[in-house]
Image (cartoon, helix red, strand yellow):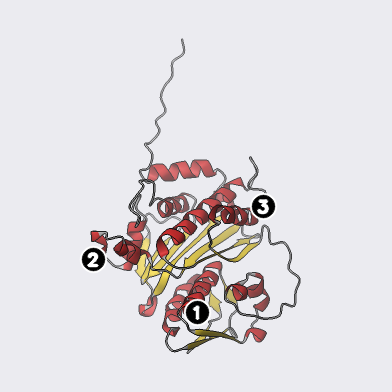
Amino acid sequence: MRLSLPANINADGLLPFIAHMGEAGSGDAIEIDFTELRRVSPAGLVALTAQINLWRNKGLLVYPLGLEVCPILGYLQRMDLLRSCNFTQPESFIRHDAKGRFVPVRVIDHRVTEMGSEMALCVAPGGDEYGHPLAGPYDLVWYVLTEMANNVRQHSGGQGFVAAQVGRGEGLVRLAIADNGNGILSSFIGADLAWAKGIDDTTAILKALEARVSSKGSPTNEGVGLTLTARMAELASAWLLIVSGTGVVRQNPGDSQPLSSVLPDGGVYPGTLVALTFRQDQVLDYAQLLDQAKQASGLLRPRHNRARFGP
């Protein structure tokens, strides 16, 4: 079986590719043709990495084709796609510090907190210092990464991968987490939640956005990571995409409600993909953003200003 990568695995080309990728899992070997690939977002990188590692875990042989003529070979190498997929190709460049530019594909392991700090510092250099202009983006990236990484380790039953990129000119941070595990719906069903047996993948994603809905069931503070991520994305005028199984949920700036759909052409993604894109200048005060997200999610009581009278 051959999987020919399209020119663009980003923006409008991401979901069709994910659907097409799911069709390539038949046979004993898969050839992945990189010849035409021109653009790929962090979401595309981690989704492809998770899928390739899933095929390998199932015993399939996976071979790359056309790497030597791929126009973005250097980018794929710098983003560690090849390394994460166990593809070997000589590098014709010298690696430099990526701080402030990108975070290459990384596997999610037990060092979740440490990994979150390292990646947040790479996306927002200096943001770990009090009062730094990038403190807000640093804290948001750390929160989203650690929450989603813990979801992968606790719920998915598979491998997870993360990557990020900063568009300096546009001030956009693109962050993506993907796993090749059970998917959200299967996690709910596996937890013996009776209501989960009659819903589809899209409904399961929407259910996961509700506060305190978790396949773990307890303690009471579980099941809020994805909820607060979605709320903060809404408040920060960010873009959020969640794909799991056949389901797709998008949240765009200005939308009053998430937009739900399914993967095109009957596609299925084996696991969960979460992609967040936000503008750095929209996350200046993370503490306030998180507080507002908790209030909007019903996790905090609204604060009321009380009049005070002096003596």
Lateral position of residue 7 relative to residue 180, left or right:
right
Q: Residues within 10 Å of mark 1 (few under 14, many from 20)?
A: some
Res 67 quadrant in image = bottom right
Amino acid beneath label 3:
Pro
Task: Give the Cα separation between the discs numbered 3 and 2.
Answer: 46 Å
Camera-near label (3 vs 2) is 2
Q: From what the image shows, is residue 36 above or below residue 253?
A: below
Camera-near label (3 vs 1) is 1
Per the image, the residue denoted by label 2 is 198
Q: Residues within 10 Å of mark 2 (few under 14, many from 20)?
A: few
The answer to whether residue 42 of the structure is visible from this angle is yes
Lateral position of residue 181 relative to residue 87, left or right:
left
Lateral position of residue 286 relative to residue 215, left or right:
right
Per the image, the residue denoted by label 3 is 125
Residue 112 percent coordinates (x, y): 54, 56
Task: Give the Cα separation between the discs numbered 1 and 2.
Answer: 32 Å
Q: From what the image shows, is residue 211 above or below residue 4?
A: above
The answer to whether residue 10 of the structure is visible from this angle is no
Residue depicted at 38% across the width and 39% down the height: 300
Foreground pick, 82 / 153: 153
Q: Which mark is residue 56?
A: 1
